[in-house]
Image: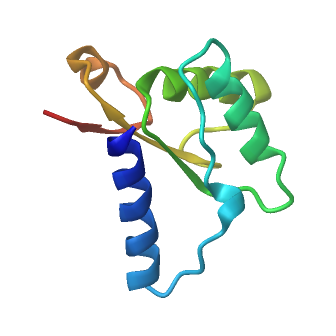
């Protein structure tokens, strides 16, 4: 998907602009299949140096990540931040510790 590639390139450009090393372990390509958000969240949290934040292009995966964090006892945003792009207006009305960017 072109939009996904564009967002990943934007992420890399932002890191380079601020002279932050790109860690390829922090770039994961996923699908919209069931439990994909859980798999990706567990992958990140099980790394020797897990990230302090996760950016999800897919809102479904981000919601699954929130559920997985709750199950694992990982506090959002205290232990890991979640950021997502969302096309669903309803999520902005929920009281979540989640940064949401609405795309038009």
Residue drawn at x 21%, y 19% as measured from the top left = 89
Residue drawn at x 45%, y 81% as measured from the top left = 16
**Which image quarter: residue 31?**
top right
Horizontal side of 7 relative to 78 (left or right) equals left
Q: Position of residue 21 (x, y in %)?
A: 60, 80
**Which image quarter: residue 73?**
top right
The quarter in which the C terminus is drawn is top left
Horizontal side of 48 relative to 62 (left or right) equals right
The quarter in which the N terminus is drawn is top left
Looking at the picture, tell me which residue is in the foreground, 25 or 80.
Answer: 25
Residue drawn at x 53%, y 20% as measured from the top left = 32
Q: Position of residue 93 (x, y in %)?
A: 25, 19
The image's colour scheme reads rainbow
Q: Position of residue 60 (x, y in %)?
A: 48, 20
Query: How many numbered tags mark residues here?
Result: 0
Looking at the picture, tell me which residue is in the foreground, 102 or 76.
Answer: 102
Residue drawn at x 77%, y 35% as measured from the top left = 42
Q: Give the vertical position of 41 relative to 78 (above or below).
A: above
Residue, far front: 2
Q: Position of residue 38 (x, y in %)?
A: 69, 25
**Which image quarter: residue 46?**
top right
């Amino acid at each position: 998907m072109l939009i996904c590639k564009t967002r990943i390139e934007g992420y890399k450009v932002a890191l380079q602009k601020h002279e932050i090393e790109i860690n390829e372990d922090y770039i994961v390509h996923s699908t919209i299949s069931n439990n994909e958000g859980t798999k990706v969240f567990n992958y990140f949290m099980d790394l020797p140096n897990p990230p302090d934040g996760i950016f999800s292009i897919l809102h479904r995966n981000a919601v699954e990540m929130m559920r997985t964090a709750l199950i694992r006892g990982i506090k959002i945003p205290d232990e890991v931040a979640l950021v997502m792009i969302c096309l669903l207006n309803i999520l902005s009305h929920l009281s979540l510790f989640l940064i949401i960017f609405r795309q038009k």
